Structure formats: C-alpha cells, structure tokens
Amino acid sequence: MNLAATDPVLLRDGFAAWQASLAELGRRSSLASLNWHPPNQLNYEGAVVFSGCDQLHVLAVGKAACQLARAASARLGDRLAGGLIVHLATDPISDLDTRWQRLPGAHPAPDDTSLAAGEGVMRWLAQLNPNAHLLVLMSGGGSAMMEVPASGWDLAGLAQQRLSDLSRGYTIEAINQRASARSALKDGRLARLVPCPWRQLTLNDVSDAPDGCVSSGPFLGLNGSDLQIANHLTARQAAMHALAERGYRVASGDTLKGEAQRAGASLPDAGAWDALVLSGETVVTGPYSGRGGRNLELIGGWLLRQNHPAQWALIAGSTDGADGSSGAPGAFFHSRDAIDRASLERALARHDTAPWFAQRGRLLPAHHAASHTGDLVILIRRGRSPETGVSSPG
C-alpha cells in the first residue's frame, strides 16, 4: 500500500512488516524447497518424500489450492502425470494446464458444489494406479469445499450446523473436529480410498493444532502430521525480522485466540519493546447481522479501551486476504485517527464494522492470497518504556 508522506512512520513501518510476512508466505507457497534428486527421488527441505517415483499425481485442496497447484506444476515439470484441484469457485484457474482437473467448492458452508467436489475426489482417487504416487497439498477451507455426508446427515443439516458452530464462536480447530463426525471424508477417511503411496504437505491455518486438523484431516486424521509448508509462526517471524531490521525492539506475543474484541482490548502496552507481533486466530460470536470480521473487531476492542500509548499504529489482518464478510483482509488504525466511540460501539454490537472502517479509509487493501496461515497483528508504539526508559525509533 502506498501511504502518504504525512502518515506516521510507525504505520509505514508496520505496513512494511505486513508485506514482508505476506512475501515470506508467498515464497513458502511457491514450494521452492520441493525438488528432484536423480534419478527418481522427490525431496522437500532435505526430507525424502518419495523414492523410486515414476508416476506422480498431485491433489491440491483449499483456499491456497490454486497457488499450490501452480507451484507444483512449476517445480515438478514433466514428472507431473496429472492433478486435481479443489478450489473456491471465485479463484482464477485458467492458467493451469490440461493435466489438471478442476472441482469448485463452497466456503464457509458446504453447498451442492461441495458435494460434487467430494464425490469427484473419491472417483479420481479410485482411478489412481497402485504403482503411482500421490502428493497431497492441503490448505485451510477444504472442510467445507469438499464433502460427503456421513450416514444420517444431508447437505442442509451440514450447512446449518457449520454456520451454527461459527456463530457460537468455536475455534477453527473445534469447528473442524466437530465437522469430522458428520462426514464420510474427514479424519483420515479419504486416505483409506487411496490405492497408492501418498504424502501430504500442509499450509497450517489452525494456530498451534496439528497439521491433520487442517480441513478436518481427510488424509492425515485430526491428530496426524507429515511435512509442513508454513504455519502462523512463519508470518509472525517474517514480520518480526522486518521490524528488527528497522531498529525496533521487537517482542513476540502469545498466540491469538479467544473472542476478538476482548483480545484487542487486552493487547499489552507495557514491556521493553517498541513493536509487538502476534499471530493465530480469534473468533467472533454471532449472530451476524452486518459485514465485518474478527480482525476488525480486534482493532475495535483496542480502540475502545481507556488507555493507549502516546503514539501507536495497529495492523490486523488475515493472511488469506479475507477477514470474515468484510470484503477486506483486515484493518489498520493509528493514534492520529479520531475515534468515534459511540458509532464504533454500535457497529461492533451489530458485527457491522466494515462500513465503519471503510468510511475512515482504514480497511487493508486487497492482496493476492498465495497462502493462509491465520491472522497477523502488528502493534508499534513510540514513547518511553516504563521498564527501560528507552525511547522508540522514529
């Protein structure tokens, strides 16, 4: 984002750190560490994925499926025998070559396309040669995007229950665990249909939960793990490094969790640091009557608190580019901005914060979602630390 020269240096530095985190996630999602070792060994970050691999197929699933499929095509070249991508219907996929079959699915609640995707994945897996090898590229969102209901469930019941779970403020880990009991695909059930050896690379979007919890673990099972591409700490560490390079004393906060407004209100403002970086994912308890998102509500909670540092900048956003129904990745604010507490309180009560931030030009700009590992919060302050008396940079 191009900020005006008059914007505070704290905000410009915060945006530089935000962009650095997205760039690192993009690099990881490019699968740069996936390579062939002659004659037929596939490695990832030095670990052997497959040995004696002559016929390799790839299944890419979730919000980052398009990016991962493109990366697989580039890294595997002619060794890619064929692929299947389960993607959001709005994703651009025209640049994928004819080796890829495409199945759109819905999110956040499953619909008819999700059922078609689930059944299509089952058919595709059943047709694999037992002598082939399957590489699964899993990212968040697949739990709703491909589905086959368990006995006693239908599509309407699945969609209603998922939206109910979301409105109750369950964590994504809990939502995926609950969804697994209603599915014929989740918690390792899809893996039982694979007739050949398989491995999974995972973009983890469920904070500190196992990789298997991503998309309700159709291959790994909810508690399983294999090889990880990135998680929320990847974005956090990249942002921290970028801020440290600019001279900030940087601290790493606790994993983001709990109700979004309370998380924002309880952000620490004391300690021997100038910049605080947190990652993870909060929740918003419904029912929802407007357009908003958990990062917007987190900033709202911060704005309504009674005490702030003298000068500060706060950025909170989702790495997948979509914060709830807000239409933006998140929002930002700084100490020069006026806070209309009454209108903000009304917006938070209705979960209709997107218009409030948009009116003030404080929604984060859209970005290409190359990855998704949860949310990132960057808080920078200027002033004297009560503990050290040292002034912040700027």
Image (cartoon, rainbow, N blue to C red):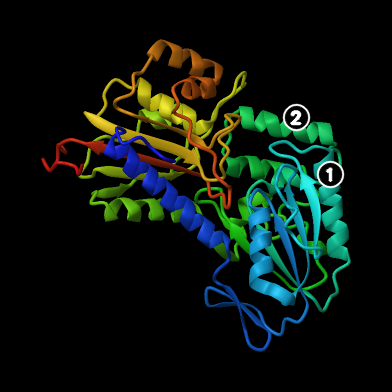
Query: Can residue 254 be spotted in the picture?
Result: no
Q: Disc 1 marks which residue?
A: 115
Query: Which of the two marks, 2 or 1, is nearer to us in this view?
Result: 1
* Position of residue 272 in the picture relative to residue 47 (left or right): left
Amino acid marked by disc 1: Leu
**In the drawing, what numbered circle is on residue 160?**
2
In the displayed structure, would residue 10 be above or below residue 199?
above
Work out whether residue 204 or residue 338 is closer to the camera in this orientation and state it. Answer: 338
Work out whether residue 350 or residue 102 is closer to the camera in this orientation and state it. Answer: 102
In the displayed structure, would residue 304 be above or below residue 12?
above
Look at 21% across and 42% down and name the residue there: 394
Residue 147 x, y percent position in the rendering: 79, 46
Near mark 1 (Cα within 10 A), the count class, few <14, some 14-19 or many ≥20, is many
Q: CA distance from mark 2 to mark 1?
A: 15 Å
Look at 73% across and 49% down and name the residue there: 87
Q: What residue occupies the far front of the structure in this picture? A: 5
* Position of residue 97 in the picture relative to residue 263 (left or right): right
Amino acid marked by disc 2: Gln
Q: What residue occupies the far left of the structure in this picture? A: 389
Element under disc 1 = helix
Look at 48% across and 30% down and name the residue there: 363
Query: Can residue 102 be spotted in the picture?
Result: yes
Work out whether residue 58 or residue 163 is closer to the camera in this orientation and state it. Answer: 58
Q: Quadrant of the N terminus?
A: top left
Residue 240 x, y percent position in the rendering: 34, 52
